[in-house]
Every structure is written in structure tokens, then in C-alpha cells.
Amino acid sequence: MYYIKHLYIFFSKLALIIFFFSTEVVKAKSFEINDIEISQPFVINFDKNKVIDQGFKNAFFELMYSLIKSSDFKKIDSIKLNEIKGMIETFSIKEEKFIDQKYQLNLGVSFDKKKIFEYLEKKNIFPSQILKERFLFIPIIINENGNSISIFSNNPIYDNWNKTNKRYQLINYLLPSEDLEDLNIIKENLDVLETYDFNEITKKYFLKNSVISLIFRGNKEVRILTKIYNDKNEIIMNNSFKDINIENEKDLKFLIDNMKNLFEDNWKKINEINTSIKVPITIKVRNDDLKKSNNFELFLNEVDLVSYYSIQKINKEFIFYQVIFNGTVQNFINIMKNNKYNLNTQKKVWIIE
């Protein structure tokens, strides 16, 4: 009887473990979009559901602005509300109030990552990892007529650059301080600025990313040569804008917005997720250390390149995870290493040591 009782307890615990770690449950990180604010006049035909629906649309497009390049926006313009709702996991009303005959709503929306990626894949759009990063930005205005330059003073781009930030933008810009030494270095290299690497200046700020824009100002055209440096490579971009007067507030805002879009698109391209690549990886974790397995699951939830994962099986020694990764095997190993996970990859099933 004693043996049967303990056998029952053992199988009861096993059933709970199997339920908790069901191999049918696929884990996926959600995209959280918070503080969506909508305001609508409180009139006779007021419909709160329509306000919430508008909030869903606003949240979806804010997510898209962070995920996809500007050239892909036209592919999602015609999305229907029902399609957006089908990708929502949960939503919450953070705050609602009536002020001056207006209904004001603050909404939080959680989107299913897997469904978002599937939708974008159908639209032939490769999303980007949502990686916020800090860049040093040095805008140098060069007057092509008089061969004079403006770096700090009399530089409207320098003065107004950080006045037009959008919260969905991934790049946070640090502008250089008004350093006389930097000004002299640039003036000394005026004739070779297009080939100068600016390392003397950028190294002072201890940032791995920097953007140098040479803005050639003509009578009817602004031509911009941009050098983008990161820890991987150097990128050179050439762009031109006609009929732009940077002394005009409207033209200046247009120019800054377009420059930021170009830089955002470039950053997204660098961190693009190729969802057509689906690499299955099997990893086992010892099941006598629940903290390790829990932390590993939290880690997988945070990696956008992990399309999804599930628990394949459990035996008396290990928990076996099936991970679907949108990238190369080496890329996955590098990500694990950068997050202090030691992988033994000697056998077909890898193990976290």
C-alpha cells in the first residue's frame, strides 16, 4: 500500500509537470505598445468601441514604424481592422477621462510576435529587430558658393535636430559639444572632408556608432554625403533634396525628418530579420535546475530572431527545447555567447553547460 501511495504521488507530480511544460504550448514574445492616447468629442452618437478601434490602429502602425523600413509602409496601408485585431493578444485601458466635452483614452496593446512576423512575411516584408541604440551625430553644413562651414553656430540642423524626435524611432542622437579643438580639426581638413574618417573627434565620445553628415548647401539644392560608422562596418550614403531652404522652418523640418528616416532605414537594414530562414535548433537543459531553465525561457522570449520555441520532451535528466531561429546557426551561437550562455555543440542536441 505504501508503494502504491508513493507511486500515485510520483505520477501526479509527473502529470503536473507535463501539463505545465506542454509540448503543444509555443512560447512567443509579444510586442508591447503603451500610452496610445486618443481623444474624441463626446457627442450624442459617441461610441467608445470606435475610439478603442482607432487606438488599435494607432498602436499597430506605431509598431510598424519601429519594425519595417519606410519603403515598405505602402504594403501595409490597406490593412483591415479585423486583421489588426487578429494579431492582438491583450489590451488594457490605462486611463480614461472626460475633459471639455472630450473623451480621452490611454491604451496599452500587446501584439503576438509570431502573428506579426507571419503577416509581414506574407507581405514580403523583412522586419527589423527593435534595437534602440545611441549614435553620435555630427552635421557639417558646407556652403558650396563661399566654401565656408557651419558646425555649431549658425547651423540650424545642429540646433533643431533633437527637437523632432518620435518615440518609435530606434536611434537616439548625441550631438557633439561645442569644442574649439574639434572645430579646428574639421577646418584643417576642409579640403579632404569627404575622405576624412573623423576618428580624432568621434573617439572622445566612447560610442560605437556615429553618423557624420556633410551637408553641401547650394542655391537650389542640398546634397548630403553621410558616413555611418558602427562596430561592424562603414556605410556611405549620398542623397539630394531640391528646392530646400534650410533657413525656412518648414523646409528644415522636412529635411531633418527625411534624414532621420534614412538613418532609421539603414539601422533597420543592418538588423533585419529574414523570417524566410527558419533554422531548427534543439537544446537541452538539466531539469534539476529550474532557475536555469526559467532564465533560458525568459532569454528566448527577449530575442526577436527567435521565431518561437517549445518544449519537445522531458526525461529524468533534461528538458529538451526546440528553437526556431530566423538566422544562421553561428548567429545564434554568438547571441548566446554575448548573453553569457555556454553551449556545448559537439553533438546534434546541444547542451547549456
Image (spheres, helix red, strand yellow):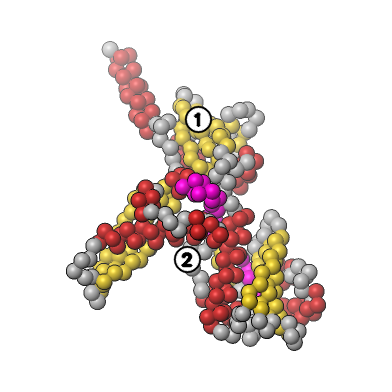
Given residues 154 and 42, the one toward you in this image is 42
Residue 316 lies, in percent from the top left, at: 46, 24
**Residue type of the residue flagged with mark 2:** Arg
Describe residue 48's horizontal placement relative to residue 221 as left or right.
left
| Residue name at image x 52 percent, y 64 percent | 169
Name the N-terminal-most of marks 1 and 2.
2
Residue at position x 28%, y 12% in the image? 1
Which x, y percent locates residue 78? 43, 56
For image coordinates 71% across by 64% down, the residue present is: 236
Residue 57 falls in which quadrant of the image?
bottom left
Q: Is residue 41 magenta?
A: no
Position of residue 252 relative to residue 309, above or below, is below
Q: Which residue is mark 1?
A: 320
Disc 2 is placed on an element classified as: loop
In this rendered view, identify the residue nearer to me: 137 or 255.
255
Question: Would you name the residue on which mark 2 appears?
Answer: 167
Query: Quick one: 271 or 247, which is closer to the camera?
Result: 247
- The magenta region covers 119-140
Quarter-wise, where is residue 41 in the image?
Answer: bottom left
Where is residue 30 drawn, in percent x and y? Answer: 43, 49
Question: Is 43 rendered above or below residue 111?
Answer: below
Q: Is residue 304 visible in this depiction of the protein?
A: no
Q: Nearer the viewer, residue 243 or 188?
A: 243
Q: What residue type is disc 1 on? A: Phe
In this rendering, does residue 255 appear at all? Answer: yes
